[in-house]
Amino acid sequence: MDPSTEATTEEAAKATADPKKEEDPSKSSAPETTTEKDQKTKNAAAKTAEATSDSNEKEFGISVYLSPDHVGFSAVLKARYSDFVVHEVGWDGALATLSSANNNNNDNDGQDPEDKPQNPNTETQNDKSDKTDKKRKREEQDSSNTTKAEEEENGAANSKSQKTDDQKSPGNDNDKTTKEETPWENLQTEFAKIVGPKEAQTVLDFLKQDATAEKQQQEEETKAKLFVALPPIADKDTRRQVHQWIKSSAIHAIATADTADDDQGNKVIRFWPLRHETKMPNHGQFHRSKGRNSKHSNNNKVKKQKAPPGSPYLQFVLYKENCDTHTAIKQITQRMSTGGRGGRGRGRGGRGNDRVRVGYSGMKDKRGVTTQFCTLQHRSPHEIDWVNYQSSRGGGHTSRGGVALVRVGSYRYVSDELRLGRLKGNRFDVVLRNVQIDDEASMMVTDTTKFEATKKIVTTAADNLRNHGFINYFGMQRFGKFHDTHLAGVALLQGDFQQIVHCIMRPKNGEAPRVLEARQKWQQRFDALKDDATDGERAQVESSCAKSILRSFGRFMASEVAVLESLARNPLDYKRAFSCIGKTMRMMFLHAVQSFLWNKVASYRIETMGRLSVLVGDVVYANDDKTAPERNNTASKQPTAVKVVTQEDVDANKYTMEDLILPLLGTKSVKPTNESSKLFDSILAENGLTMEMFHKIQDRDLASCPGDYRKLICRPTDVDVQVVQYRDPVQPLLQTDLMKLNNIPIKLASSASAAAAADAPPPLLGVVVGFTLPSSAYATIALRELMKKPTSSEYQKELGLGGTAPPASADNGEPALAASKNTE
């Protein structure tokens, strides 16, 4: 429990505007009076409020639940970055899924590897780890992200939670094959039709023996047993059939193959077990350019595939783990230009190096496993699929943390470039660990009944989320890592640029000592000067201080670096220093203020004015446009048409609570005409702001701020939930796209194994929940409604994973990417 959370009975009573509760006939034979029912409701609400309030969230207006009556539960969120899987839902409703990492648009797809760039004398490729990963991780730990841009918490998914203890991938039958269940007889029949019964039997006997060998025996095998070769095949079409069969049959789950010359110069096909894949002479060399130094050259000249007429853009799925979208795109495009220096692509929604623009619809969370659609103009898959062969220990199934991984695949050509905002929403699949039920009645004697009680409570919570939705709050990440971006936004509206610089540069808790020391030095830069010091003296001191501390801030602390670089050259010119911060980040300061106001008014509207009925003076989209897109773009120059609800609308029941919208204040936004409007004015006054200040923003890029609107209630779709048992507190519980490609299953503690281990501690309980949200909604807020618990980092720090974690295991040896199988 969060020790900082308290709520009064009066506050809790206000939170329950819906008195509908089912009576329990087993507790009383006499009917309850209305007064008794009301008192019960108030008592239940008070208890819920006491257990679910969070001072940090309440400070930013996140204080009310839409359905406060059901029992909540606590759980650890994002214990592993692979516990948060996001798939983008495209503009056309398609899910961004890495279903294939092979170069499907390859002109030579299906032909012999001998016709592709190879170097038979090349040693086994063991790509060196990206040295920048360690540097990036070190700098991220130092980063304050004072002005951290909001990473849009969006994505989409085409896979649901695992349905059985064996955790087979639903809807992915082609990838279920494992070494233990390989259909050898079927493979024998299929393969014999191509190469003959004897040859097929020889190959499959070798692979079958290798698949069932003990690990110790595998390590002691000689190099002569790394592969088995077919007799020479002179006919090229037959060789092509063999390679195509390997890719399309169940054999691809346990073996790969290449073509080589024997001692007499004849072409032979060699079959390699996947565990020996990295020992293949040409491992990782397919799809590379011909010529010398093709492994590292930035001047690779590959044969570009021509785009179909009318479809000049190569669309691909970007799969990333534990890194932000900009970093992933920079990695993909770093070999695509001879310019060498990174930079910003021209136009909106694109970023790459100085000659490449990658189109995408939105940013995705860094701490998570996300997939999204991207586009490149006049490009070929050959130019980016090299990233799939970079060595990595990621994939979501290891016990190692902090690993950044990028993969691309699922290529196709399209007619339009992706731009920011061109997505329908995101699919989230999230793991909640060490679930603990609050209700005292759920304290069961046996583990079995506890599991069933937890399942019942979680199912009820999921039903409420599915049927009623949640208050569409802006999440805590909207306000930066240190929850202070709105303070800079207030100073921006007031025109106090020195205060903005103070908000950015002030000391912050939890930072690295060298960063904290630099911030303190900046705060004390004028302490040694006399009170009557001249501006020239102050400027000299400030410039010197800025230069001396600049190197203490990492490359992810972009706002601090921009401010200090400017003040080192032009001390005391705080307006100029603010203008040196990127436009997107400057807009985030303003957005944070608007979001702060919106959250406060949203809580007031639900808690005080009721959560069930539309009232006169509320605001809705005009022209009955209930599907009006939420741009989440407060700087839009074309505000959405809205109308104020009239008494006639209320009498006709024309609108529901899901139709209501609240404004993100701006110069052209329309406020409600009921009590909600007064609260907007009151909060503005409390923070020293007025509506006129939105008309007088002293920043040319932000001067036009007409405002926007946001739905008050958000109802997720495709909600599904599963309660699971597990023993290792950090074991994988959710299968990522990469795990599916590599046929890596999820292994959970079954009921039988749990019962057999009498001396073992009881298994831990987890929840795997999935849902789809529109692009402007926050998954953490949906989870808050589901659990009836805060999701702030401060609250999460008080929770534990439970159990005893085993020593961190080494990588299990599974290949980092299925596409690296040389079966083409």
Image (cartoon, rainbow, N blue to C red):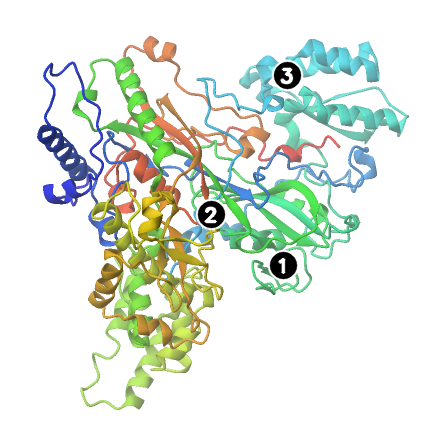
Residue type, numbered disc 1:
Arg
Q: Position of residue 494 (x, y in %)?
A: 29, 74
Does 387 sit left or right of 544 as displayed? Answer: right
Q: Which mark is residue 357?
A: 1
> 654 or 473: nearer the eye?
654
Q: CA distance from mark 2 to mark 3?
A: 48 Å
Label 1, secondary structure: give it: loop
The answer to whether residue 250 shows anywhere in this view is: yes
- Which numbered mark, 2 or 1, is in the foreground of this view? 2
Which quadrant: the C terminus? top right
Please report whichever mark, 2 or 3, sits nearer to the chain's N-terminal start. Answer: 3
The answer to which quarter of the image holds residue 402 is: top left
Task: Identify the residue at horizontal 62%, vertical 32% (top origin).
Answer: 818
| Secondary-structure class at tag 3 | helix
Q: Nearer the viewer, residue 63 or 351?
A: 63
Q: Nearer the viewer, mark 2 or mark 3?
A: 2
Q: CA distance from mark 1 to mark 3?
A: 46 Å
For label 2, the SS is loop
Residue bearing the label numbered 3: 210
**Mark 2 = which residue?**
775
Task: Say which label, 2 or 1, has the lower sequence index.
Answer: 1
Q: From this viewpoint, is residue 262 visible?
A: no
